[in-house]
Image (cartoon, grey):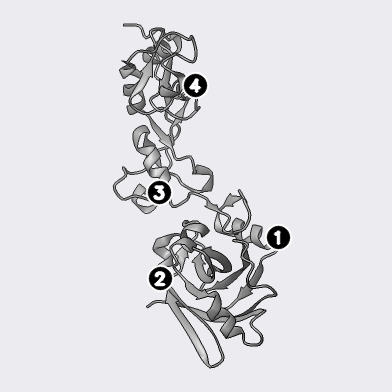
């Protein structure tokens, strides 16, 4: 039975999948991502007309079952159907509850490259597995870890490091030990903003040291923590310690750096770091307790 969509009818009679020349150097998919994925296959090009068929006209995202259609054959995704109040966004006819099973089957027959192909992923994935793969793809770009701004820059680690240095003017240090002094004239003011971000290069990797003030309930606190510029499975190969003190007292924290895949806010709000209450911080600072002077020292090491 005709679908009512001439482009779709043409697709049924003329498959739009083209196989380019073989590439003998392509590895198994297991080496780039999820071992449950199928082996990487030669590159496949899907024509723009097929991509357009699978694109929701409302949100412009790829459609997944259930794919809905009106009586004239116009389709849209299940997420957008409630938003259009049961009216086809193309012809304004009532949608009803018609499933476009044929288009769902066409989608199931497709294999597409990962959207992070330009970042190095060479995998080809079934249409309905592609979304899950991309959410876990080891080649997906990293977001800028600089807190206190709405920075939208993404890229691989060398790109992010260069961005932090050139655009955010972040201090860059070589070595696995650090000794930093943080000073604030009015420690009673808490602006929920990062005071300092420092990048360390050691063991052939990069690490971000955060130190900031934020409000915990009605009391301001200070927190220092380390993030690993890479994925979580690599971050677990390293440990770090932080120490702060004064007036003959000290506090020590030891932990595992969190991957920058976890947002700055997620790490901070989980309290996964050295937390210093304001009164204790002022005690460490000495003097008349009107100025915050904290010296944070630490080191990074690789687990055997």
Label 3 sits on a secondary structure element that is: helix
- What whole-number distance in Å separates the C-alpha atoms at marks 4 and 1? 40 Å
Give the residue at the far bottom of this rendering.
248
- What whole-number distance in Å separates the C-alpha atoms at marks 2 and 3? 20 Å
> Where is residue 175 drawn, in percent x and y?
57, 78
Residue that mark 4 sits on: 57
Residue that mark 1 sits on: 166
Mark 4 or 1, nearer chain start: 4
- Can you tell which quarter of the image residue 6 is in? top left
- Can you tell which quarter of the image residue 281 is in? bottom right
Label 2 sits on a secondary structure element that is: loop
Above or below, comparing residue 2 to residue 105 in the picture: above
- What whole-number distance in Å separates the C-alpha atoms at marks 3 and 1? 29 Å
Mark 2 or 3, nearer chain start: 3
Label 1 sits on a secondary structure element that is: helix
Mark 2 Cα within 10 Å, few/some/many (few <14, many 20+)?
few
Above or below, comparing residue 149 to residue 110 in the picture: below
- Can you tell which quarter of the image residue 122 is in? top left
In the image, which disc is placed on residue 237?
Answer: 2
Is 22 left, or right, of 146 in this rendering? left
Mark 3 or 1, nearer chain start: 3
Residue 109 visible here: no
Residue found 57% across the figure and 51% down from its top: 155
In the image, which disc is placed on residue 136?
Answer: 3
């Amino acid at each position: 039975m005709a679908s009512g969509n001439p482009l779709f009818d043409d697709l049924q009679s003329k498959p739009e999948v083209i196989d380019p020349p073989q590439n003998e150097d392509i590895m198994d998919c297991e080496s780039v991502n999820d071992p449950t994925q199928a082996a990487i296959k030669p590159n496949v090009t899907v024509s723009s007309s097929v991509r357009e068929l699978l694109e929701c006209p409302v949100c412009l995202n790829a459609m997944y079952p259930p794919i809905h259609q009106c009586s004239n054959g116009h389709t849209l995704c299940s997420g957008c159907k409630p938003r259009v109040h049961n009216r086809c966004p193309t012809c304004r006819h009532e949608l009803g509850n018609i499933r476009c099973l044929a288009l769902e089957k066409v989608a199931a027959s497709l294999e597409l490259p990962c959207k992070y192909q330009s970042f190095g992923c060479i995998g080809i994935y079934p249409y309905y597995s592609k979304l899950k793969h991309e959410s876990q793809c080891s080649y997906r770009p990293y977001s800028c870890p600089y807190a206190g701004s709405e920075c939208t820059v993404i890229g691989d680690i060398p790109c992010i490091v260069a961005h932090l240095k050139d655009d955010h003017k972040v201090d860059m240090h070589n070595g696995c030990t650090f000794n930093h002094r943080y000073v604030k004239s009015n420690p009673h003011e808490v602006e929920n903003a990062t005071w300092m971000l420092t990048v360390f290069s050691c063991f052939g990797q990069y690490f971000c040291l955060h130190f900031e003030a934020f409000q915990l309930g009605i009391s301001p606190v200070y927190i220092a923590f380390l993030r690993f510029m890479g994925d979580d499975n690599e971050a677990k190969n390293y440990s770090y310690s932080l120490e702060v003190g004064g007036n003959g007292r000290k506090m020590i924290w030891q932990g595992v750096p969190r991957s920058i895949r976890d947002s700055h806010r997620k790490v901070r709000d989980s309290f996964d770091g050295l937390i210093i209450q304001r009164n204790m911080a002022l005690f460490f600072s000495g003097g008349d307790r009107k100025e915050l002077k904290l010296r944070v020292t630490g080191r990074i090491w690789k687990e055997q």
